[in-house]
Image (cartoon, rainbow, N blue to C red):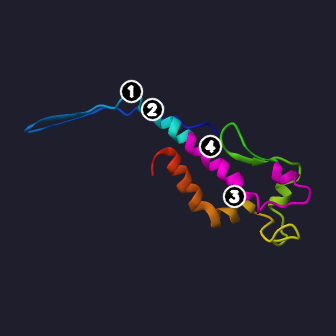
């Protein structure tokens, strides 16, 4: 997944009976907003890793530690058994934590999704 790039919008001229108005975007618009959105996406990915930690199955800790943000700013857990653990039919909870188990991202998102979105909006300068 490529990092999205913001392009400078076209200008706009509105003519009326009493004159005209022209909207001109600053040249720095695209650079600034691309940076803001990239920072927000990075913030969101880091928050996902942090909030998922108590939900990820834990035996040796290898699966939990394998969670990382990719160069395209998505989140991934890289172990040979990550997919099997994620889609496992076993129930949630274990001796290492009551939240640990399959579908950790989906369960984390239900609890902390809004917090992550607010944090990303703040990072993008939208709050």
Label 4 CA crowd tier, 10 Å (few <14, some 14–19, many 20+): many
Quote the CA–CA distance across marks 4 and 1: 24 Å
Q: Nearer the viewer, mark 3 or mark 2?
A: 3
**51 sits left or right of 102 in the view:** left
Q: Which residue is mark 2?
A: 30
- Which corner quadrant of the image does residue 30 belong to? top left
Q: Nearer the viewer, residue 119 or 89?
A: 119
Going from N to C along the chain, the mark reached first, 4 or 1, is: 1
Q: Is residue 119 visible?
A: yes
What percent of the width, then of the height, locates residue 24?
Answer: 29, 31
Q: Residues within 10 Å of mark 3 (few under 14, many from 20)?
A: some
Which label sits on residue 72? Answer: none
Query: On the image, which quarter does residue 7 sit in?
Result: top left
Secondary element under disc 1, as helix, strand or loop, is loop
Judge the density around disc 2: few (<14), some (14-19), many (≥20) Cα neighbours within 10 Å.
Answer: some
Of the numbered discs 4 and 2, the one sitting upstream in the chain is 2
| Residue position marked by numbered label 3 in the rendering | 51
- Residue bounds of the magenta highlight: 39-65
Q: Main secondary structure of the magenta part?
A: helix
Q: Secondary structure at mark 4?
A: helix
Q: Residue at x 58, y 60 (%)?
A: 115
- Judging by the rendered image, the residue that carries numbered circle 4 is 42
Q: Residue at x 53, y 56 (%)?
A: 118
Q: Are marks 3 and 2 in contact (CB under 8 Å)?
A: no
Tell me if mark 1 has few (under 14), some (14-19) or many (20+) residues whose alpha carbon lies within 10 angstroms of its own: few
Q: Is residue 99 magenta?
A: no
For this orientation, the residue located farthest to the left is 18
Q: Which residue is mark 1?
A: 27
Q: Quadrant of residue 26?
A: top left
């Amino acid at each position: 997944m490529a990092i999205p790039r913001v392009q400078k919008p076209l200008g706009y001229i509105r003519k009326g009976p009493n004159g005209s108005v022209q909207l001109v975007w600053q040249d720095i618009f695209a650079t600034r907003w691309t940076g803001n959105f990239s920072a927000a996406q990075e913030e969101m990915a880091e928050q996902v890793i942090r909030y998922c930690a108590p939900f990820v199955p834990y035996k040796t800790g290898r699966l939990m530690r394998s969670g990382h943000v990719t160069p395209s700013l998505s989140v991934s857990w890289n172990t040979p058994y990550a997919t099997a653990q994620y889609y496992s039919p076993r129930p949630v909870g274990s001796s290492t934590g009551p939240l640990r188990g399959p579908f950790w991202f989906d369960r984390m998102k239900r609890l902390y999704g809004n917090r992550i979105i607010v944090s990303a909006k703040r990072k993008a300068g939208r709050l």
